[in-house]
Amino acid sequence: MSTEIFTLFTLWEWILWVTGFFTILWILYLRVRNASLADVGFCLAFGVIVLVCGVTSEGDLSRRALISAMAILYAVRLGYHLFSHRVWRKSEDPRYQKIRTILGGWESVGMFGYFQLQVPACLFFAGLLCWVMSHPADGIRWWDILGVTIFLVAVIGEAVADRQLELFRRDPLNKGKTLQSGLWRYSRHPNYFFESLHWWAYVPLAIGLPWSGLAVIWPCLMMSALRWVTGVPWAETQALVSRGDSYREYQRTTNMFFPWFPEKK
């Protein structure tokens, strides 16, 4: 795998810049007390790193333009959604409220650590796209078309799932109820499923690079994190608290992660 994936700055310079950025966000967090700023910051830093790689790297121009466009579309869509629905005039995500309660008097220090954890995450996931940009092939290949197709399905699917959930939550009559229509009929967490699917888009784009098989590491890590660590477990716990028996029935009939037809009630 090429080590020259960050061509404008050295890796250590990138670490310095991104660390400074998340330190500024942490200072802002101390004022607004909404840790979702870290999630928005991830999208922004990720998009900037990939865009800089796209402008400065030496790979094929069409490939660089394609992957840069994919990164910007992903980062802007997700970042805007997180900012508008979890930060701007919104109460903090319950999972962060719980973390802050657990941290107690160590809240400020603990949350500083959480914000700084975004630094290696940004560099790691942006590094995948920067690496794929270094592919020696000229022009767009059939493998690239497959990757773009997976990307579009994933980004559109996640956007639709987020929109369906937001519209459901806006209706006061749905308070305490569980969304079981649209994409949410086939998966209890379609947004997390499509988010993990998005990272598989870069696997076919990497085919032909030395050690291209390593590209599966990124989507596997993201899927594992969403399924077992940061996504599904927290969402399931909160849903059981807020929706009780309604959600337990939903758990009985609907797949947790991978979409499939629900069981009959």
Image: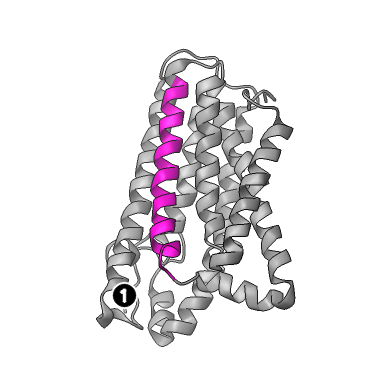
The picture places residue 14, in percent across and down from the top left corner, at 67, 35
Check residue 182 for magenta coloring. no
Q: Residue at x 31, y 79 (%)?
A: 265
In which quadrant of the rendered image does the N terminus lie?
A: top right
In the picture of the structure, the residue carrying the numbered disc 1 is 264
Q: Residue at x 41, y 19 (%)?
A: 140
Q: Nearer the viewer, residue 246 or 125?
A: 125
Task: Give the main secondary structure, helix, strand or loop, of the magenta stretch.
Answer: helix
Establish if 146 lies above or below 55.
below
Element type where label 1 sits in the image: loop
Q: Can see residue 156?
A: yes
Q: Residue at x 41, y 83 (%)?
A: 243
Q: Is residue 174 left or right of residue 126?
A: left
Name, please, the residue furthest toward the top: 138
Range drawn in magenta: 63-90
How many labels sit on residues?
A: 1
Q: Residue at x 42, y 69 (%)?
A: 90
